[in-house]
Image: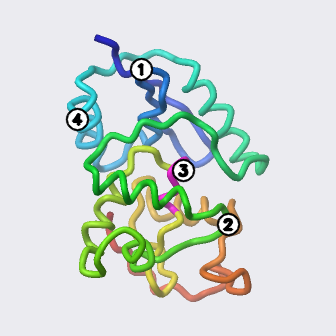
Amino acid sequence: MEPILIHPFHIPFGELLLGSYNNELCLCDWRYRRMRSTIDARIQRDLQAEYAESISPVIEQAKAQLNAYFAGERTTFNLPLRFVGTDFQQRVWQALLAVPFGSTMSYAELTAKVAEPTAICAVASANGANALSIIVPCHRIIGSNGEMTGYAGGVGVKRRLLQLEKATMGTPQVDLFSMPHSGIVHGA
């Protein structure tokens, strides 16, 4: 049985855990996030494989592309991805891939794309279960009023990622970081 190869990777905003299975990236997540054991258990169970610390070609590609992203030289990622989750979660994660660099979308807008409006909590939960952070840009999902809401890497990291992308809310004329924030943080 092939293992899931994992490798810790330091970035300017913290430490990620990168993982590949059959040379597809299945993990790019915050190493010390609150749901670490839950995410790891889901990936290992669904792929029926154990973690083994090592490197792979796709992990090397991911490192190079992430370094370029943080250097301001890359706005999209081109990696073979392996989504590990329910059909619903995978639908949400696919929708996240369509949120362009430098923009944001509210949880309500994301929900309208993938489910009935009453499913906003399920969509937010799927967003929080994303194991491919940054590459599948769950950090681009914010509260309807522009509020920074929960993020696996922490709300401060979410804000820094959006600043790196010079993100705007809705139209380019509304700068996300000149808007007042309530200071209230809603968890993911």
Residue 122 at x, y percent in the picture: 25, 67
Residue 15 at x, y percent in the picture: 50, 39
Tell me the quadrant of the picture where the C terminus can be found.
bottom left
- Label 4, secondary structure: give it: helix
Residue 8 at x, y percent in the picture: 48, 29
Question: Residue 5 got which mark?
Answer: 1
The tag earlier along the polypeptide, 1 or 3, is 1
Q: Amino acid at mark 1?
A: Leu
The tag earlier along the polypeptide, 3 or 2, is 2
In space, the residues marked 3 and 4 are separated at their CA atoms by 21 Å
Instruction: Report which residue position mark 2 lands on.
Output: 102
Looking at the picture, tell me which residue is in the foreground, 91 or 170.
91
Residue drawn at the location 48% of the way across and 48% of the way down:
133
Residue span colored magenta: 135-139
Q: Residues within 10 Å of mark 3 (few under 14, many from 20)?
A: many
Q: Residues within 10 Å of mark 1 (few under 14, many from 20)?
A: many
Relative to 116, say whether 145 is above or below.
Answer: below
Relative to 58, say whether 90 is above or below.
Answer: below
In space, the residues marked 2 and 4 are separated at their CA atoms by 32 Å
Q: Is residue 136 magenta?
A: yes
Q: Residue furthest right?
A: 73
Q: How many marks?
A: 4
In space, the residues marked 3 and 2 are separated at their CA atoms by 13 Å
Residue drawn at the location 42% of the way across and 20% of the way down:
5
In space, the residues marked 2 and 1 are separated at their CA atoms by 31 Å
Instruction: Report which residue position mark 4 lands on.
Output: 41
Question: Residue 98 got which mark?
Answer: none
Question: Residue 134 got which mark?
Answer: 3
